[in-house]
Amino acid sequence: STKGAFMFGRIDICDFILEHPSISRFHA
């Protein structure tokens, strides 16, 4: 699925957001 591939390419960013809750709103 395209969504799955997109998320896979964003793993680094997701981990970064988990480390920085202040940036979590950007993901949302």
Image (cartoon, rainbow, N blue to C red):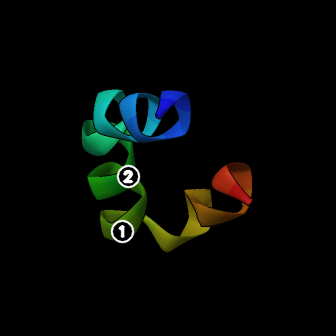
Residue drawn at point x = 70 percent, y = 50 percent: 26
| Side of 3 relative to 7 (left or right) | right
Query: Can you name the residue that lies furthest to the front here?
Result: 1
Q: Position of residue 6 (x, y in %)?
A: 46, 29
| Side of 3 relative to 4 (left or right) | right
Q: Few, some or many C-alpha atoms within 10 Å of disc 2 (few <14, some 14-19, many ≥20)?
A: some
Q: Few, some or many C-alpha atoms within 10 Å of disc 1 (few <14, some 14-19, many ≥20)?
A: few
Q: Position of residue 19 (x, y in %)?
A: 30, 66
Which mark identifies residue 3? none
Quadrant of residue 18 within the rendered picture: bottom left
Callout 2–callout 1 Cβ contact below 8 Å: yes
Query: Which is closer to the viewer, label 2 or label 1?
Result: 2
Residue drawn at point x = 59 percent, y = 66 percent: 22
Determine whether the residue tagged by mark 2 lies in a helix, strand or loop: helix
Q: CA distance from mark 2 to mark 1?
A: 6 Å
Q: Position of residue 15 (x, y in %)?
A: 27, 56
Determine whether the residue tagged by mark 1 lies in a helix, strand or loop: helix
- Of residue 20 and residue 14, the one placed in the foreground of this image is 14
Q: So how many labels did they put on this image? A: 2
- Of residue 2 and residue 16, the one placed in the foreground of this image is 2
Q: Where 10 falls versus 17 (above or below)?
A: above
From the image, tell me which residue sits under label 1: 18
Quadrant of residue 4 within the rendered picture: top left
| Side of 14 relative to 26 (left or right) | left
Q: In the image, what residue type sits under mark 1?
A: Leu
Quadrant containing the C terminus is: bottom right
Q: Where 2 falls versus 4 (above or below)?
A: above
From the image, tell me which residue sits under label 2: 14
Residue drawn at point x = 43 percent, y = 58 percent: 17
Q: In the image, what residue type sits under mark 2?
A: Cys
